[in-house]
Amino acid sequence: MVVSSLIPPDWHQLLVDFYEKFPSRGLPSVEHFPIFPWIAPRVSTKIIEKVRELGVERNLTTGELLFEIGARVDKLCINLKGFSARSLVNPAGFEAQGIGIAPPLHIAAGNLNFFTQRPCSGCYYALCPSQIIECSSQRLREAAQDDSELMFELARHFEMCAISDRMVFACRALINSEHRLQAFLCSWAANFGLLDQNRSKEVKIETVSLPGPALIGKIMAINPLVVERTLEKWESLELLDISNGKTLIVPSLIDPIYQWITLKDKESGVVPYPPSIQTYLEKEQPHFQGS
């Protein structure tokens, strides 16, 4: 399998190393999980435990297929370690210049169609040596019919996946390039961020290095030069620090877009969001590691 040239060769390894270095990063609590664009939501502990109970664990080699082009998505696969990827293809079936990446503790394949067993439009495969757990759709449906909490958790997760996709279009259509870049940083921080407090007790969010301006520009539909200038401006204002293989983000840089994404002023759902990106990251993270 040829991986899209849009992904730098060392980028996935950087993220794998991050999860190995910070195994306690774990999962956010079931009650508190904000929705962010571009990176799909993590799977809750309850779903992971049920898939592990009903299914099997597999080790994948680089490039090993989970589903071929057009295959029916008849099982739920969840990454424990490593990365899976989805190659987006054109109608003729050739690999397009697009790829979706599922990091650890996310659905490895078929975010939206494993329950319905509809075929995939692209193909899913391991981007690097990976470890997954998987179980058949039928077994999970049967379990959910006897467990209302599991059914609610599955419905909630799929809703977040769908809304996350819609937020991409909302951001592209409704907000300017600077706000779109803030939204990307918000998504990045939610998935790969840890709170860091220095000697002056100033709290910042530490994440792995960002992709380069060219790749961010492709993801966000922003001219790479605009991406570069905007990041430099935020660095000059000491809201962002990109150096030494990591990125530090001041929470106030991304809180306004967090508020917009989570629609805090209109919240009326049964699952509350934390009031800020910092309080989200402060929530207790249940410990979970692949065996």
Image (spheres, helix red, strand yellow):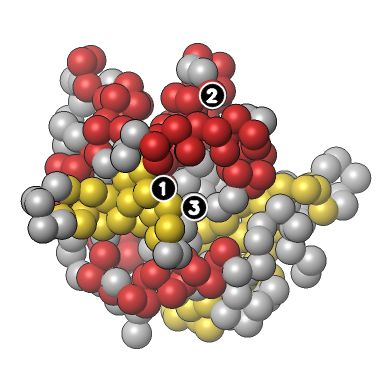
The disc, 3 or 1, on the residue closer to the chain's N-terminal end is 1
State if disc 2 and disc 1 touch (CB < 8 Å). no
Q: Amino acid at mark 2?
A: Ser
Q: Position of residue 115 (x, y in %)?
A: 50, 49
Could you tell me which secondary element the residue under label 3 belongs to?
Answer: loop
Q: From this view, report whether residue 70 is shown above or below residue 167.
A: below
Mark linked to residue 188: 1
Mark 2 packing: few (<14 Cα in 10 Å), some, or many (20+)? some
- Asked if residue 53 shows in the view, the reply is no
Q: Is residue 260 left or right of residue 222?
A: left
Q: CA distance from mark 1 to mark 2?
A: 16 Å
Disc 2 marks which residue? 177
Q: From this view, report whether residue 126 is shown above or below residue 277.
A: below
Disc 3 marks which residue? 210
State if disc 1 and disc 3 touch (CB < 8 Å). yes
Mark 3 packing: few (<14 Cα in 10 Å), some, or many (20+)? some
- Toward which corner of the image does residue 125 lie, by quadrant? bottom right
Q: CA distance from mark 3 to mark 1?
A: 8 Å
Q: Position of residue 49 (x, y in %)?
A: 28, 68
Nearer to us: label 3 or label 1: 3
Nearer to us: label 1 or label 2: 2
Residue drawn at x 66%, y 57% is 7
Could you tell me which secondary element the residue under label 2 belongs to?
Answer: helix
Q: Position of residue 73 (x, y in %)?
A: 61, 56
Q: Amino acid at mark 3?
A: Leu
